[in-house]
Amino acid sequence: MNLAKFPRRGYVTEPTPLEALPRFSKALGADINVYIKRDDLLPGTAGGNKTRKLDFSMADALNQGADTIITCGAVQSNHCRLTLAWSVKEGLDCHLVLEERVKDSYNPEASGNNFLFQLLGVKSVTVVPGGSPMMAEMEKLAEKLRAEGRKPYIIPGGASNKIGALGYVGCAEETLRQLFNLGLSIDHMVVPSGSAGTHAGIIAGMIGNNAGIPVTGIGVNRKKPVQEAAVLNLANETLEYIGTDARVPAEAVVAFDDYVGPGYSLPTDAMVEAVKMLASTEGILLDPVYSGKAMSGLIDLARKGYFPKGSNVLFLHTGGSPALYAYLPTFRA
Ligand SMILES: *Cc1c(COP(=O)(O)O)cnc(C)c1O
């Protein structure tokens, strides 16, 4: 697909590594070969998936003459950290609106991404209660900044709109090219599914390229039907934006909600097991909120025989390891 017609900033300069996980696969003991796409190693402060989306979102902001970026996320948001980091790099101000999805979870002294918000020089942090209308909250802030003579640009949560999702269509194409170069045939891909842009972009890219590689999403927040509808909508909106006739059929979108546990960002035993297992077998850090829960899904599905024996399964590592340091008691318990 022709993604070159869309302006981007060039934050993604080369393909992220695609690696075999032989020791992890052996420890899993489910007779499958697990591979990993290392988007945790993308450029931008501490890496992670939002860089691919922001590559396009920030280009749109600059083309519209913005001098200020506003975005939103949870209190340990990787998306907020990376939006702020790229704003710094572009010489733009960045304001964050943080949603306390878990009551009283915001602590200005907290470690992890919250610490990085301060270190990177965030212009303002507005904390709002869980369930607040985030777009309206950001609009309110934009109005205030406009009255001060600024030119704010709002990036939605997770940069999950058709502009940001282009980054993950690009990732699907990058992955297919990489698999060809490696002479590696993948049977299945597993991706985290949060604000939906990553999952939607990957499935749009795989189906738009007739790859024949099924994609399973592991939800970290919403109920299965709600998440699947969000992914399907965004995937097809993105394909339409690209200008291709390809569309994602509803049955191609799977986003399990069995691994969320008690709620978004709240730890599960299976997440702790997944994080420890990948760290101790392969030396790779997952995170407690997204990639750790997604990997706990892959582990459980593998143990249940969801992937046929001998399958090559590719896990998309979306990053997030700074949040580990905000969860020390969970891992020490
Ligand atoms: C945002 C994020 C995700 C989820 O991506 P979405 O596009 O929001 O679905 C997964 N992993 C990490 C580390 C993230 O920060």
Image (cartoon, rainbow, N blue to C red):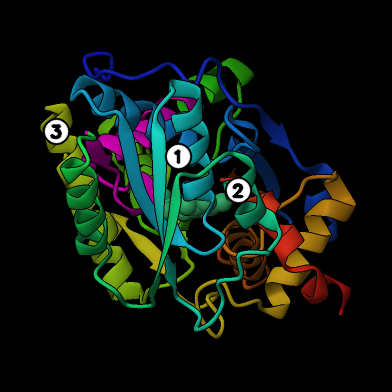
Q: Amino acid at mark 3?
A: Tyr
Look at the image and tell me in which quarter the N terminus lies: top left
Residue with the mark numbered 3: 241
Q: CA distance from mark 3 to mark 1?
A: 23 Å
The picture places residue 296, in percent across and down from the top left corner, at 65, 67
Q: In the rendering, which numbered label is found on residue 18?
A: none
Residue with the mark numbered 2: 118
Q: Residue at x 87, y 51 (%)?
A: 281
The picture places residue 53, in percent across and down from the top left corner, at 39, 35
Viewer-proximal residue, 27 or 116? 116
Q: Amino acid at mark 1?
A: Thr
Mark 3 vs mark 1: in front: 1
Image height of 20 relative to 130, above or below: above
Q: Amino acid at mark 2?
A: Gln
Residue 158, magenta (yes or no): yes
Q: Report whether 188 appears left or right of 252.
A: right
Residue with the mark numbered 1: 83
Residue 291, magenta (yes or no): no
Q: Residue at x 70, y 46 (%)?
A: 33
- Among the two numbered marks 3 and 2 on one chain, the one whose residue lies closer to the N terminus: 2
